[in-house]
Amino acid sequence: MIVVDASALAAFIMMEESSRKIVDYLKEGISVDHIIKEVGNTIWKAYIRGYVTAEDAVKRFEILMETVGNVIELVSEVDLIREAMKIAMENNITLYDALYVALALKMRIPLLTMDKGQAETAKKYGLNVIKP
């Protein structure tokens, strides 16, 4: 298993260059339920900025929902929020990013992320970090 953070899943959903490297990790993925909101917001931003059409945004959101519904197991953020707040405060990262680190710590599994600050924080806790 591997914790998939929003930056990695968003890269896959938005078909960024690194998305081919990410797809294999998704099959073993687990994440925080908050990931739906974060990646959904990425799709919305792409639409608002004119990078994708409304139709394309809806299709990408449906792919997101299928992926988290069928491939990535979700864990409630409520179960991790206290530890995540501690991690966020101690390491000056967002609470959102700290949720993924807290999940990886709890399960003692690697973290898949594109986020440099989050990766550095995870490494401080002895976690294996995969950056596609």
Image (cartoon, grey):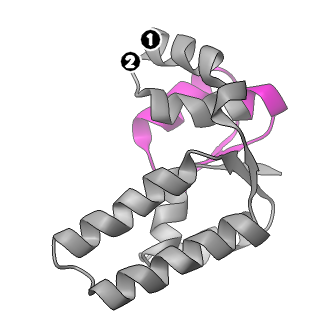
Q: How far apart are marks 1 and 2 (CA)?
A: 5 Å
State if disc 2 and disc 1 touch (CB < 8 Å).
yes
Q: In which quarter of the image is the C terminus?
A: bottom right
Look at the numbered disc 1 and give the secondary structure of its residue. Answer: helix
Residue 108 within the segment the image draws in magenta = yes
Q: Mark 2 points at which residue?
A: 92
* Residue 1 can be seen, yes or no: yes
Look at the numbered disc 2 and give the secondary structure of its residue. Answer: loop
Q: What residue type is labelled 1?
A: Met
Residue drawn at 67 percent across, 75 percent down: 66
Percent across and percent down for residue 46 are 27, 71
Depth order, front residue of 42/119: 42
Q: What stretch is highlighted in magenta?
A: 104-132
- In the shown orientation, is residue 77 left or right of residue 29? left
Q: Name the residue under label 1.
A: 89
Residue density around tag 2, few if under 14, some if 14–19, many if 20 or more, within 10 Å: few
- In the shown orientation, is residue 70 left or right of residue 46? right
Percent across and percent down for residue 25 are 72, 64
